[in-house]
Amino acid sequence: MLPPDPTSVRMPPDLLVHARSAKGFMPEDEGALLHRWARVQLAHGPVLEVGTYCGRSAIWLGGAAREVGGTVFTVDHHRGSEENQAGWEHHDDSLVDPELGLMDTLPTFRRTIADAGLEEHVVAVVGRSGTVSRWWRTPLSLLFIDGGHGVEPARTDFRGWAHWVMADGLLVVHDVFPDPADGGRPPYEDIYLPALASGSFTEVEALGSMRVLRRTTGGAGDPLA
Ligand SMILES: C[S@@+](CC[C@H](N)C(=O)[O-])C[C@H]1O[C@@H](n2cnc3c(N)ncnc32)[C@H](O)[C@@H]1O
């Protein structure tokens, strides 16, 4: 199947306003890619995102669910990745729980999704990705991985989630940088390359740092080669 046509499939304008104003790390062209593919895939089963942060990408995915029906699950412990912690490049002090002294992006996420009117379509799963994936059993029409970008979190996300993509379902990976000069390696080396090497996935679109892979052998729950 060809990628959905970006000139004919567009985010509803009322939600575009929310996606643009939400805190987060999802450029508009890559968010629009998520929306287009989710519109196609949601007819076949739920979408799951790893890495909610404050809900920006969840709005793009949830917009598709509002239009065509279906559910988007989004998994995060809401304590932030390494680069979100105090002293790091992507720290936002307004997201720290003052009593605990820890990052807590959940309240901002809830408000963002409520303001966008997407509470019926986007379901937060609060917990460590590896803990949630260990108990997950539902085939996914689209898996979007944008969680921790270190080696271990990336490997855990790939091993824990990728085999739940259904036959003809999609694995979408963010921050894939084949050239080390452009950014960190784990999404490329520990998710994207192993997915292709498994022989279970075939690339169907690349845009910016997004890669869209289709599951072309095996089905949900079958181990990857
Ligand atoms: C790059 S941000 C996600 C950005 C988001 N998709 C957006 O559109 O703005 C990565 C998120 O992954 C979460 N995260 C990192 N490691 C995790 C883990 N092991 N389990 C659950 N969430 C994790 C962090 O808390 C952070 O919110």
Image (tube, helix red, strand yellow):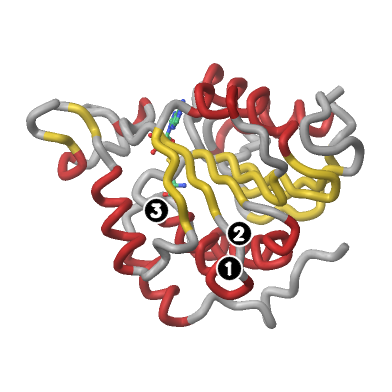
Compared across the picture, whether 58 is left or right of 67 comes to: left
Q: Are marks 1 and 2 in contact (CB under 8 Å)?
A: yes
The amino acid sitting under disc 2 is: Leu
The amino acid sitting under disc 3 is: Gly
Q: Which element is circle 2 on?
A: helix
Q: Which element is circle 3 on?
A: loop
Sequence-wise first label, 2 or 3 = 2
Pointer 2: residues within 10 angstroms few (<14), some, or many (20+)? Answer: many
Quick one: 162 or 7, which is closer to the camera? 162
Q: CA distance from mark 2 to mark 3?
A: 13 Å
Q: Pointer 1: what residue?
A: 64
Q: 145 above or below 57?
A: above
> Measuring 62% from the left and 38% from the top, which residue is drawn there?
177
Q: Is mark 2 within 8 Å of ligand 1?
A: no
Residue 139 % position (x, y):
72, 42
Q: Pointer 2: what residue?
A: 34
Sequence-wise first label, 1 or 2 = 2
> Measuring 13% from the left and 26% from the top, which residue is drawn there?
100
Q: Is mark 3 within 8 Å of ligand 1?
A: yes
Q: Pointer 3: what residue?
A: 55
The amino acid sitting under disc 1 is: Ala
Pointer 3: residues within 10 angstroms few (<14), some, or many (20+)? Answer: many
Sequence-wise first label, 3 or 1 = 3
> Measuring 65% from the left and 61% from the top, which residue is drawn there?
38
Residue 159 % position (x, y):
67, 23
Image quarter (top left, top right, bottom left or bottom right) of the N terminus: bottom right
